[in-house]
Image (cartoon, rainbow, N blue to C red):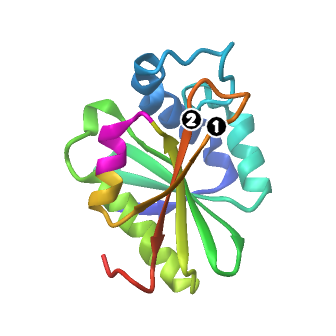
Amino acid sequence: MTIVSTRPEDADRIAAIIRASHQDVAQMFHITRDNNPKHPSFCTRDWVLADFERGEEYFLYETGSRTAGCVAFEQPDSETAYLNRLSVLPSCRQRGIGAALVRFIIDYARSKRVRTISIGIIAAHAALKNWYAGLGFIEKETRQFNHLPFDVTYMHLCLNERAI
């Protein structure tokens, strides 16, 4: 297993992984292009390129000759980072790949002296909320957005308080 940094030239491959990895969530929560056109299950090359332009960094999880997942890291200020677009292909789940990608981002954030990592998830996705809690994330707040068909729960990991 290797986690590698990416470049804009990888945008097509990244978008394909994100789309495929989030299809089941879109189905589970009845997400469509009409009610949430920016859901990761509809990710495009242009979205990923726009992320790169904003300074977001993507990393791929590779096993042998296969790419099994990806994650993005965004740092809006010197003390905060966002863990974005965590994606593991359905055929590669339940093997610790998601946790490995999260731990990679935690280590990466520490190397940049980040104090807090934040994520946003579908509030009703209890299994995902519990999974992140198992990695040390704490639920902070849940918000409603008029443009989304679900509430969003924000979870944080304070890097000074917990060593994963």
| Residue 149: image location, x then y, percent | 61, 23
Q: What residue type is labelled 2?
A: Asp
- Can residue 98 be seen here? The reply is no
Q: In the rendered view, would you say 131 is above or below 159? A: above
Disc ID at residue 151: 2
- Can residue 51 be seen here? The reply is yes
Residue 31 relative to residue 135: left or right: right
Disc ID at residue 77: none
| Residue 9: image location, x then y, percent | 67, 47
What residue appears at the point 59 percent right and 15 percent down from the top-left corner?
A: 32
Query: Magenta span covers which residues?
Result: 124-130
Q: Does the magenta stretch include residue 126?
A: yes
Residue in front for this viewpoint, 64 or 60 = 60
Residue 93 relative to residue 60: left or right: left
Q: In the rendered view, would you say 103 is above or below 85? A: below
The residues tagged by marks 2 and 1 sit, at their Cα atoms, a distance apart of 5 Å
Callouts 2 and 1 close, C-beta under 8 Å = yes
For the C terminus, give its image quadrant: bottom left
Q: In the rendered view, would you say 15 is above or below 131? A: above
What residue appears at the point 62 percent right and 31 percent down from the top-left corner?
A: 43
Residue in front for this viewpoint, 49 or 54 = 54
Main SS of the magenta part reads: helix
Q: Name the residue under label 1.
A: 144
Residue 25 relative to residue 38: left or right: left
